[in-house]
Amino acid sequence: MNQDLSILHLVLNASIVVQAVMLLLVLISVASWAAIFRKLFALKKVKNQNEEFERNFWSGTSLNDLFSTASRNAATSGPMERIFASGMREFQKLRERRISDVGALMDGARRAMRASFQREMDVVETNLSFLATVGSVSPYVGLFGTVWGIMHAFTGLASLQQVTLATVAPGIAEALVATAIGLFAAIPAVVAYNRFARDIDRIANQQETFIEEFSNILQRNVSAQAAGTR
């Protein structure tokens, strides 16, 4: 009885439909774990890059030097550094066009940084919707396998004259394995989604705060230069 109800025996003796559901859920679970680890390392890298750039930004280094470094390291720089480079590049282009209006300069720099911010957040949020889908759909896929397995088990019992627990248990047990695998795929995806969503919100808030602080610095510099030329 113990051997008949082992997990491996139940999976191997399940109906074709239930086995297909189990295989699909296992593949989804593997893909989900791969996405979780990729996102974990990616967010850690983003946070380290942003923190390093913020330290350099507030260390007293001139904006032109920071911009030169960001331009040289565009391929390996972090999101915050690329946002800074976008704003600074647009600001310098407007200055080269002899635009002296403070409002026009700041609006152009902010629009450039906002566009860069949206691009960076799209990259940071990659695979997040996949985890949400896995967390919400996997239990229902497993439930479908369970319902189908129970239907198959009771159909097979219809020809028996005497039905006991020993004859019913294997069919129901193999059907319930599908639900268990569905939950095994869904629970880590939901936990990871909530964790990553919270981390991404913090990154977004950090970058939005930087945009405002950098805009204030640019505005003070422009105002000081305008006052000095009078």
Image (cartoon, grey):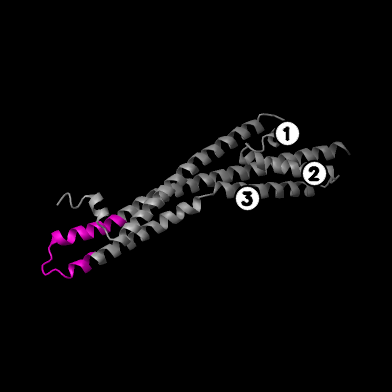
Label 3, label 2: how many angstroms apart (C-alpha)?
21 Å
Label 3, label 1: how many angstroms apart (C-alpha)?
23 Å
Q: Give, as a single range, the part of the protein colored magenta.
A: 153-178
> What is the three-letter code of the residue carrying label 2?
Lys
> What is the three-letter code of the residue carrying label 1?
Ser
- Find disc 2 in the rendering and name its residue: 93
Give the vertical position of 127 relative to 17 (above or below): above
- Find disc 3 in the rendering and name its residue: 118
Res 222 seen here: yes
Of residues 71 and 217, which is closer to you in this image? 71
Of residues 41 and 150, which is closer to you in this image? 150
Whether residue 147 appears in magenta in the rendering, the answer is: no
- Find disc 1 in the rendering and name its residue: 68
Q: Give residue 189's position: percent from left, percent from top.
A: 42, 50
- The image quadrant of residue 170 is bottom left
Query: Left or right of 155: which side holds 220?
Result: right
Query: Left or right of 90: which side holds 177?
Result: left
Q: Secondary structure at mark 3?
A: helix
Label 2, label 1: how many angstroms apart (C-alpha)?
15 Å
Q: Give residue 191's position: percent from left, percent from top.
A: 41, 48
Badge 2: residue crowd in 10 Å (few <14, some 14–19, many ≥20): some
Q: Secondary structure at mark 1?
A: helix
Of residues 15 and 49, which is closer to you in this image? 15
Q: Residue at (30%, 53%) from the top-left corner?
A: 180
Q: Give residue 74's position: percent from left, percent from top.
A: 67, 38
Label 3 vs 2, first from the N-terminus: 2
